[in-house]
Image (cartoon, rainbow, N blue to C red):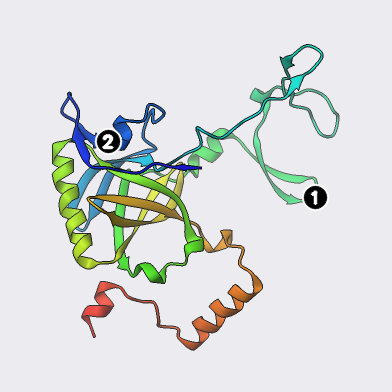
Amino acid sequence: MHHQSLSQQQQRPDGRFESAYVAGNSTAARPSWEGHLRLSLLTCPVTLWAATSEAETVRFNRINPETNNRISMVTVNAGTREEVERGDLVKGFQVAKNEYVLFTKEELDLVETESTKILDIEKFMLRSSIDRLYLDTPYHPVPSGKAGVEALAVIREAMRKQQMVAIGRLVLSQRERLCTIEVEEDALQMTTLRTEAEMRRSLTQDRRRKAKTVARPGQGDQSPRRRAGR
């Protein structure tokens, strides 16, 4: 996976501002997310661009050597071995062996997480208090328009004064995600966070984490509110 660095903001001929990273990468066809970054009462229109690329990954196709043609994957019923049209398929959740609860697209749409298009900064934490295992996918928040550049600069400087990492929340790809937001020179970098359920710790790591929690249950709470109350 190739990491894309974010350089200074530049203005396009149409008046919009974007990073040189975006302007200089033809593979960055569209942003991963568009909305507003919000810190208290201050909001800033931003787009999120992937900070990594898999464009240079070597990929292979399955070829029939006798004809030199690519093969087509066929959807087959696992029980009857009969071919099934993809358009006739629905999603199912397994509750027991060979037992599934089926859901139509309409039913899934009803429970789909609503995208508010808001990236909310909820609190600040010390960078050292965040386990590296939680860090998932990095993105570059890029301001939209001149007003966005000015607002983002205010948010960035407020974060720089805190000397801490912001913890935010947003809906990305129909899933609510927590993320870190930190200052990267004159820009920001956002990284989504994995959940505890996604962690696969070694036995030693798990024992140390549990021992630390039992011995020092309050340690690691470095929010500005706690610090101010000391």
Measured in 3D between alpha carbons, the distance from the residue under mark 1 to the one under mark 2, in whole angstroms, is 52 Å
> Three-letter amino acid code at disc 1?
Lys
- Residue toward you, 86 or 18: 18
Query: In which quadrant of the rendered view does residue 156 lie?
Result: bottom left
Q: Is residue 116 among the parts visible in the rendering?
A: no
The quarter of the rendered structure image containing the C terminus is: bottom left
For residue 43, above or below residue 221: above
For residue 128, above or below residue 121: below
Q: Secondary structure at mark 1?
A: loop
> 220 left or right of 65?
left
Whether residues under marks 1 and 2 lie with C-beta atoms below 8 angstroms apart, the answer is no
> 7 left or right of 104?
left
Q: Nearer the viewer, mark 1 or mark 2?
A: 2
For label 1, count other residues whose C-alpha is less than 10 Å away and answer few (under 14), some (14-19) or many (20+).
few
For residue 142, above or below residue 177: above
Residue sitting at x 80%, y 50%: 97
- Residue toward you, 2 or 89: 2
Which is more N-terminal, label 2 or label 1? 2
Q: Secondary structure at mark 2?
A: helix
Q: Position of residue 44 (x, y in %)?
A: 21, 46
Residue sitting at x 24%, y 35%: 18
> Three-letter amino acid code at disc 2?
Ala
Q: Position of residue 182 (x, y in %)?
A: 31, 57
Among all residues in the image, which is located at the extreme top? 67
Disc on res. 97: 1
> 129 left or right of 124?
right
Q: Which residue is mark 2?
A: 20
For residue 112, above or below residue 183: above
